[in-house]
Image (cartoon, helix red, strand yellow):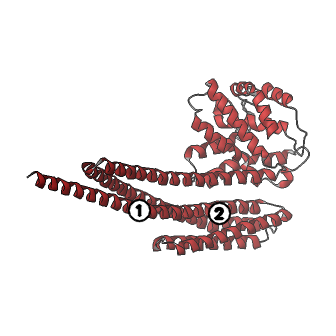
Amino acid sequence: MKLKLTRSALIVIIFAELVGLFGILFLRHYFDLNLKTYQNFINVNFVERTDISTIKQLIYEHEAVMKNYIWEKSPEARVDIRESLALVELKLRHQLNDHIEVMEKSDFGTYKMGLFTSVKDDLITYLNYNAVICAANLDEEGNRQNIEKYVKENVNPLIKHVNNSIKLLESVSQNETDTINRKMSRNFSRCQTISLLSVILMGIACIICFWHSFKVFSSLEKDKNSALEDVSNKEERISEIQHRTIIGIAEIIESRSGETGQHVKRTSKFVNMIATKCKEMGVHPEMITEEYIDLITRAAPLHDVGKITISDTILNKPGKLTPEEFEDMKKHALVGGRLIHQFLKGIEDEKYLQIAQDIATYHHEKFNGKGYPYGLSGTDIPLSARIMAIADVFDALVSQRCYKQAMNYNDAFALIDSEAGEHFDPVLVHVFMQIKEDIIENAKQM
């Protein structure tokens, strides 16, 4: 009876070990298959989203240069702009063809292939429309009005349709990502269940089998976290590409007025320092949070984006502007706000979009109501624009421009302080004076 019981126990133990080992082997194989599928999807999805993001940025860049071409009154300047248009068009065509090749090599599905092919055809038509515009003589009387009508009736509806198609393509990709994430989550849950059963069965047999199962389970969790972290890193990279593109566009605009691009970097740093000090001192605590500081810092480089519509003659004039020229220069604030709304709406976060618009539109308003474009005063001026005004004016004072020499730092701080309550928010000026040494040190380094 005892021998029979021992044999039965041995059979149960061996069976438990075999079941446990089979469960572990199956678990490992099942996990590897799913992980490989998931990683392949992530890689293809990343390439797709990166390509689409690049195409969108090239479209925005082409639109901006095209508008500059239409608004430019100088034939010589339009020749240079046409060269820029040709370069952007070449990049866009290459990117479209490259993405078609990627889609043909990968299983993107008939619907997505057809959708992107439609986007490509529309963009080719858009480029052909713009070729018609470039071929027109904008100096002949009445041609400019005809071109603007042509853009309104043909180009604008087409590019709107392209943007809607791209959004739909992004939506389809996001739905696919959500679907596979849910599927992988279910698969990981199944893996965890199988692992748990294996651990229980192996525990009946011996401690060694239990320990082995535990190590496999831990490995699964580690691989899962690694895969999720990889997705997060690639999404952050896409966001960084977008931000660097925005910075690059801002630097290109600044370079038209003789700046090297350092102006946008310095003012962005000064804005960050002022906002950070405000948070430390408890100034506007209801608004200035870590998120707000990050948003205003990233939005600051776009404060003069509207200057893309100002002619080089005015931007680089060494002497004082005439009243007519100054009125043209003042238009860049309103144009900048509209451009940011037009190009970034639906792409960037709404909070970022609002701050960027406020900075571009209102950074030339004065606290006493004598600024432009609307003559706002006091706290009616958005906080972000009041901070930007101090950073922008200070950097302009201590920088050499085509129409003036650089002012020394102490004189610049004294001038800012003297304008408290007139040009600038007195509370923010007080904050600015508290970080004088840090501002000077950073200005010298940049």
- 416 horizontally vs 122: left or right: right
Res 34 label: 1
**Quadrant in the picture for residue 351:** top right
Q: Residues within 10 Å of mark 2 (few under 14, many from 20)?
A: many
Q: Could you tell me which quadrant the C terminus lies in?
A: top right
Q: Residues within 10 Å of mark 1 (few under 14, many from 20)?
A: some
The residue at 87%/50% (across/down) is 316
**Quadrant in the picture for residue 321:** top right
User: Tag 2: residue type?
Assistant: Ile
Residue 356: x %, y % from top left: 64, 44
- From mark 2 to mark 1, how far is it between C-alphas? 37 Å
Is residue 164 among the parts visible in the rendering? Answer: no
Judging by the rendered image, the residue that carries numbered circle 2 is: 59
SS for tag 2? helix
Q: Is residue 323 above or below residue 4?
A: above
Counting the numbered discs, the total is 2
User: Tag 1: residue type?
Assistant: Asn
Residue 267: x %, y % from top left: 74, 40
Residue 66: x %, y % from top left: 72, 63
Q: Is residue 260 above or below residue 147?
A: above
